[in-house]
Amino acid sequence: MLRSMYSAVSGLRNHQIMLDVTGNNIANVNTFGFKAGRAVFEDNLSQIVRGAAAPTPGTGGAPGVGGINPAQIGLGVRLGAITNIMNQGGLQVTNQTSDLAVQGDGFFTVQKAGATFYTRNGAFNFDTDGNLVTSNGSYVLGYEYLPGAPWEPGMTTAAQATAIEPNANVTANGTAALADTAADSALPIAQRIMFPAALAKLSTATPAPPQPLLGAATAWATYLAGTAASGPITMQSFQINPDGKLIGAFSDGSKRAFGQVALTTFNNPQGLEKVGGSMYTATTNSGLPNVGRAAREGRGTVESGTLEMSNVDLAQEFTNLIVSQRGFQANSKVVTASDEVLQDLISMKR
């Protein structure tokens, strides 16, 4: 059989893959946090028809012989790789505080059924327990503020009371000074960022890190200090700073931090494996996850009320669509031409 036919078949097969990759990119042009893929081809095995030869010097005054280059016949094309283009996508303002976008190289770290994943899609919302979750119910991971732990340099809290039960109050006096000396962890964290519901009471429960927190993140309430007050203190609104800190505004007029979103970077983000739901998992070639606080060590900043759009370039994708289609058509012509040659060979004996 003709080598040209098999080479053309490999061309048909791989240009179909290029069409598949291009079609997937176009389909996800409006998927938040999506990173476009790119098919990379490489030539297949080449059959050596004639080997190379070095130049031969002349002897006895006779001229020598020049070198000979190898003669090879290619045997088609194969898929070299499908790479993820990890460039930053454009930002879209949503004005919804729980929508987050990473301005930089970091990934949000999420957890579902005990497994850890990474995503650039920050379209988060709250569940009935006040937990920050993704659209598929994965918990967003981060650092919970622990009472008495270092947090913000020079920060003092306003004089207020801590509500233990809906109908009971305790009075705390004085102020608490906090210092920013906490170090980032290079290991995956296991704490979920939990948010108090609008009418949730403040609790003095203090779970020990890094165990997952199964209730609302209210351990920060123990650092409240001040004069006597009555009635429960409720969170009326919250904001998320560029460094990922969650700042709550409470009914007593105070503002306090109660958590911080964690971001993760990798030495080779292109080595991450897509698992659906706009999520990735680490692989042996992505490197170990470098988990830490936002706005540090090149992880990027967190933009609240904003979502990262797909980085798909439609102009480039439509060009790739034409190129892959024409490549497919050209290879089909080679199959047709090879078939005609075979028909001519068969018809020679008549």
Image (cartoon, rainbow, N blue to C red):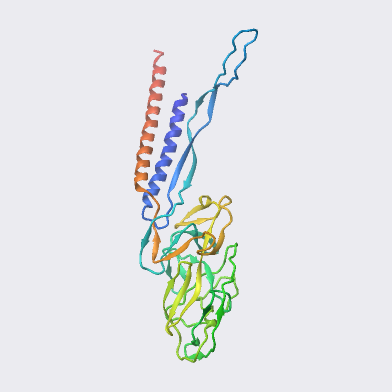
Q: Which residue is more in the foreground, 216 or 171? A: 171
**Is the residue 20 above or below the residue 153 in the image?**
above
* Residue at 35% over, 41% down: 319
From this viewpoint, is residue 129 visible? no
Q: Position of residue 7 (x, y in %)?
A: 46, 30
Q: Position of residue 178 (x, y in %)?
A: 56, 77
**Is the residue 9 above or below the residue 189 in the image?**
above
The residue at the far right in this view is: 60
From this viewpoint, is residue 132 visible? yes
Q: Locate the C terminus and report the quarter of the image it occupies.
A: top left
Q: Position of residue 228 (x, y in %)?
A: 49, 92
Number of dots carrying numbers: 0
Q: Which residue is more in the foreground, 89 or 337? A: 89
**Is the residue 145 above or below the residue 343 in the image?**
below
* Residue at 49% over, 57% down: 105
Is residue 190 left or right of 237 when viewed as pictured?
A: right
**Is the residue 126 above or below the residue 1 in the image?**
below
Is residue 187 left or right of 26 when viewed as pictured?
A: right
Task: Identify the image quadrant of residue 173.
Answer: bottom right
* Residue at 42% over, 83% down: 253
Q: Which residue is more in the foreground, 67 or 280? A: 67
* Residue at 57% over, 50% down: 285
Q: Position of residue 167 (x, y in %)?
A: 47, 91
